[in-house]
Image (spheres, rainbow, N blue to C red):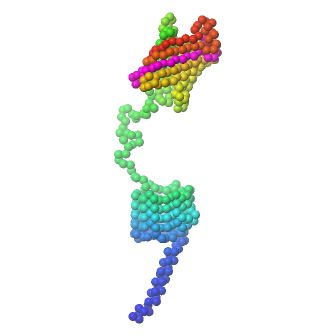
Amino acid sequence: MKIFKKNLPFVGLSSLVLLTSSFATAAEMSDMDHSGMDMSGDMMSGMDMSGMDMSDMDHSGMDMSGDMSGMDHSGMDMSGMDMSDMDHSGMDMSGDMSGMDHSGMDMSGDMSGDMSDMDHSGMDMSGDMSGMDHSGMDMSGDMSDMDHSGMDMSGDMSDMDHSGMDMSGDMSGMDHSGMDMSGMQGGQPPADARSPDYSNGVPYGQYGKPMMMGSMPLWGVSVDDLGYQFDEDQINFEATGWYGTDSNRIRLRTEGSAQTKDDKEIDSLSSLAYWKPLSIFWNGEAGVAYDTENDKSALMAGIVGTVPYFIETDVRAYLYTDGQLRLDLGAEYEWRLDQHWVVIPEVGLTAFSKDDHDNDITKGFNEMEAEVRLTYETFSRQLAPYVGFSYETALGKARGQRRQEDESVDSSSLTAGVKFWF
């Protein structure tokens, strides 16, 4: 009994010293050096760090490669910590961290104003972090200029929960240029994944690789007018044939009229040209042409397209070998009454740059042609018979010249014919 009485004051004093030391350690851990701290063992499962103050700690050599599953950071408050210039460059977190809970971790406060200049360049997080919970983690503070360039996150991070993580703070300037997150990808594609060219490993055979429709060379023929003018006793025609792709074509075009009585003369203007789109609504043409009416060849250039309200417009210029310049202007509109019946008004103007009395040509606008046709489209709109009315008149000095030669200035006629394409 005497021995125990003598030792009681010593036991009480020792307990008081230990209690005071614990409070002092928990109160301030600033400037602590964890550079050589080894946490690789299975000693952290179930650890509670919910009340720790870790301002100014050095983790540059900290080894956390051990098993940290079950660690609870749910109540950890880092909102008042100054983390500027913290060094995590050598921190090894390659261990098993599955099951770590950061759901309540608060990093939203003033961390010396920001987390700028934090160095994570050599941080190794290649371990198993599956199941880590960051759902409630608040990182809304200023994290500008944080360096993650060398951070290794190649480990297994599947099932990590960031659903409630608040990262609304200023993170401008953060450097992730060298960050390795290869472990977060899903690995190899499934065995039944589709190949980029849709071949699935099967060769194309004797026909070779298929081509897109716009890249295939095709051909077509379009007869816009093949009709008879009853009053003039002549057949009018306008046809175009082409070969090529949607971006480059060769076009053969001809238009004119053929007399059905007397000398049965044929007047036509034919051209062979290179065709190319210039924009969404406009195409360009350039080539050579031949005019049977004056028996001369010419260079041709033109532009064909659609103006607002879907009016089809074409402008073609012909430079003849004798220096004569001819300009043809045309416009056409399709007024669709229903799925088959269509009304097509059309007008055309012709002008020349100089007089040519041998061919009854005067300088300026020479003539105007107008026609209205009622068509009925059938056979998938590839064939359309029509009836219509045409009108032709001389303009400018050409009117006087025709009167002098005792020719008609104006003429009109009923027409009937067909238009088709294939």
From the image, which quarter does the C terminus lie in? Answer: top left
Instruction: Residue 151 in the image: state x and y as whole percent.
Output: 49, 59
Name the residue: 42% across, 70% down. 47
**Residue 233 seen in the figure:** yes
Farthest residue to the bottom: give it. 2
Quarter occupied by residue 85? bottom right
Name the foreground residue: 267 vs 118.
267
Is residue 96 at all visible to an observer of this figure? no
Q: State left or right for residue 150 relative to residue 320.
A: left
Q: Nearer the viewer, residue 302 or 408?
A: 408
Give the residues in magenta: 358-384
In terms of image quadrants, where is residue 159? bottom left
Taking the view exactly as shown, the residue that stands out farthest to the front is: 337
Please determine whether, in this image, residue 130 is positioned above or below residue 401: below
Q: Quarter of the image containing the N terminus?
A: bottom left
- Residue 108 position, x and y percent, is 52, 63
Number of marks present in the image shown: 0
Residue in the picture at 46% in, 89% down: 9
Q: Position of residue 84 (x, y in %)?
A: 56, 64
Vertical side of 104 occupied by 196: above or below: above
**Residue at coordinates 52% horizontally, 32% vertically from top-left?**
280
Q: Is residue 73 above or below residue 251?
A: below
* Residue 363 on image: x %, y %: 64, 15
Residue located 49% across and 21% down the image? 344
Taking the image as shown, residue 93 lies to the left or right of residue 314, namely left
The residue lying toward the viewer, choosing from 136 and 293, is 136
Per the image, is 354 magenta?
Answer: no
Q: Is residue 363 magenta?
A: yes
